Image: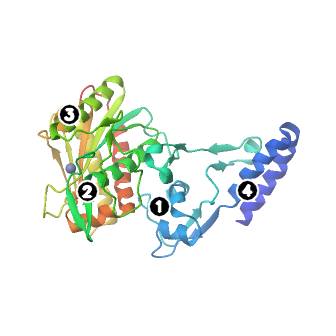
């Protein structure tokens, strides 16, 4: 902290001279504001049992306002983007800081302050609106994300601690988190099922509502087939408009299909789609690797295969992966799905699989 401070004083003196000459008082004022914000960044060592939320709270930072800043600032020191390592040092975002000024080298940067500014997307909700660019790994790729059910159809239902859980709310939350990850790596993302007032939610029990709309502000029909057809039509029309680009579709469900079974995650693709198979396989591979690394004592029972009988798999034009994240009625799966940090980890893992798929992936025409 002291060294850092001395460093800024040094810059400050040089820059002050420059700014006095060139920009006058106003420029200096802006610069000072930037430096002060940077200087107020604190670092802290995580203790055993600390989570991001508790660590931020302990340091007087509202975890919900600064969760993403924290992740962006400490990315290299997080396991799966969400878990702390005990004994490591973390940077705590300054409470007022919304943008992060970066000063890299004294010579080059004395005249220039580069600001890493996030872009806001209302769909993620107030607390999670800002997407900070992490890389351009997915530049040029287009993704269509469809979360299962929505509107009048809640999907599979379960009861947890006396409260009702609906599949569509959890699938939607994971889908939004995935959308945010993909955007942060430079992808173009279409969220096909959209809730105008539920952003990314950091609660365990996600309130059930029925106001989700389909892309373009369309009401979601009640009839099962009409509902699926609406999604297929929207995705296929966008796929046509984006012809010539690398395009992929990801459908996410939290189903109860395999009731009573102790399952993990299922990945499906269209039987005849080479690119869909590659996408599903890439995500599956990422999950297998993560389980091996973080839960070596647990057997990974997720599977991967084709399921062409599913209407969406059969009818949609982009190469696609259909993901079933556990069973909302299974106690063990509930535990995983209810914890917001786990939903974040799931989204992160899917995004890593998606990046793996894009590297060396082919554009393809249909499927
Ligand atoms: Zn479902």
In contact (CB < 8 Å): disc 1 and disc 4: no
Chain-order first, disc 3 or disc 4: 4
Residue 198, given in percent of the width and then of the height, sits at 39, 51
Chain-order first, disc 3 or disc 1: 1
Residue 223 visible in the snapshot: yes
Report which quarter residue 23 is drawn in. top right
Chain-order first, disc 1 or disc 4: 4
Residue 94, given in percent of the width and then of the height, sits at 63, 60
Residue 243 visible in the snapshot: no
In contact (CB < 8 Å): disc 2 and disc 1: no
- Numbered badge on residue 65: none
- Numbered badge on residue 36: 4
- Numbered badge on residue 78: 1
- Numbered badge on residue 166: 2
Front of the two marks 3 and 4: 3
Measured in 3D between alpha carbons, the distance from the residue under mark 3 to the one under mark 1, in whole angstroms, is: 41 Å
Front of the two marks 2 and 1: 2
Residue 189, given in percent of the width and then of the height, sits at 39, 37
Task: Out of 6 and 264, give the one closest to the viewer.
Answer: 264
Secondary element at image label 1: loop
């Amino acid at each position: 902290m002291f060294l850092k401070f001395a460093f800024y004083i040094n810059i400050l003196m040089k820059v002050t001279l420059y700014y006095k000459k060139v920009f006058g008082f106003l420029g200096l004022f802006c610069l000072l504001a930037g430096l002060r914000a940077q200087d107020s960044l604190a670092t802290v060592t995580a203790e055993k049992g600390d989570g991001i939320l508790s660590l931020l709270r302990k340091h007087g930072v509202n975890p919900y306002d600064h969760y993403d800043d924290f992740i962006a600032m400490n990315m290299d020191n997080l396991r799966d983007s969400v878990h702390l390592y005990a004994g490591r040092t973390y940077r705590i975002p300054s409470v007022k800081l919304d943008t992060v000024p970066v000063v890299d080298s004294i010579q080059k940067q004395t005249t220039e302050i580069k600001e890493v500014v996030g872009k806001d997307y209302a769909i993620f909700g107030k607390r999670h609106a800002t997407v900070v660019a992490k890389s351009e790994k997915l530049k040029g790729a287009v993704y269509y994300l469809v979360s299962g059910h929505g509107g009048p159809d809640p999907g599979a239902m379960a009861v947890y601690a006396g409260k009702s859980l609906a599949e569509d709310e959890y699938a939607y939350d994971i889908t939004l988190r995935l959308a945010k990850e993909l955007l942060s790596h430079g992808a173009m993302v279409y969220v096909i099922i959209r809730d105008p007032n539920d952003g990314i939610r950091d609660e365990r029990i996600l309130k059930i509502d029925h106001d989700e709309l389909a892309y373009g502000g369309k009401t979601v029909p009640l009839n099962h087939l009409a509902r699926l057809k609406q999604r297929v039509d929207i995705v296929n029309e966008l796929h046509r408009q984006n012809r010539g680009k690398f395009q992929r579709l990801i459908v996410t469900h939290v189903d109860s299909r395999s009731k009573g079974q102790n399952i993990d995650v299922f990945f499906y693709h269209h039987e005849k789609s080479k690119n869909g198979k590659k996408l599903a396989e890439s995500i599956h591979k990422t999950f297998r690797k993560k389980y091996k690394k973080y839960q070596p004592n647990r057997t990974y029972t997720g599977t991967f295969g084709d399921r062409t009988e599913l209407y969406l798999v059969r009818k949609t034009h982009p190469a696609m992966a259909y993901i079933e994240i556990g069973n909302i009625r299974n106690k063990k799966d509930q535990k995983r799905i209810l914890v917001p940090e786990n939903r974040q980890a799931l989204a992160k893992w899917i995004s890593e699989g998606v990046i793996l798929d894009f590297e060396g992936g082919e554009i393809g025409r249909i499927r």
